[in-house]
Amino acid sequence: MSGITYPFEFEHAIVGASETAAPIGNTTAKTYLHRVIVTTTDNNHTDISISHDSHTHLLVPGGAGKGVYSIELNLTSDATGWTATTSSNSSLIAVYKAP
């Protein structure tokens, strides 16, 4: 151990399949969303997105193909926490830092 304190202590949250506006962990206003890792198991999935305040960010469009998508976001919410919408054959892991 080097004795160096790392200032970035991230948390993670898992959002399962078929979720609509599911809260991402214990996020609140001013939560920093670092990365989202999306896993799809079918080519026929619907849109996978995240939202905060009145903004929606499309992560993986419907029909984009099965696979694992690691998406670096580096976004901060303004007034509310983050939510996620997944399809019946997808899930995601969100890496974030709450204030």
Image (spheres, rainbow, N blue to C red):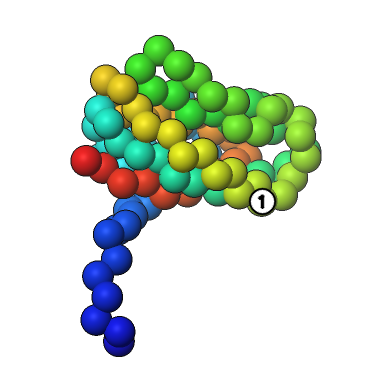
Which quadrant of the rendered structure holds the C terminus? Answer: top left
Q: Which residue is mark 1?
A: 68
x and y, in percent, of residue 39 in the image: 62, 48
The answer to whether residue 16 is above or below residue 84 is below
Left or right relative to 98: residue 37: right
What number of labels is visible? Answer: 1
x and y, in percent, of residue 62 in the image: 71, 27
Which quadrant of the rendered structure holds the N terminus? Answer: bottom left
- Closer to the camera, 76 or 15? 76
What's the residue at 44%, 24% (across, down)?
Answer: 51
- Closer to the camera, 63 or 52? 52
What's the residue at 40%, 40% (across, down)?
Answer: 33
- Closer to the camera, 14 or 31? 31
Q: Helix, strand, or loop for circle 1?
A: strand
The answer to whether residue 34 is above or below residue 27 is below
The answer to whether residue 31 is above or below residue 96 is above
What's the residue at 40%, 12% (across, down)?
Answer: 54
Q: From where the camera sits, is residue 15 visible?
A: no
Q: Residues within 10 Å of mark 1 (few under 14, many from 20)?
A: some
x and y, in percent, of residue 69 in the image: 65, 47
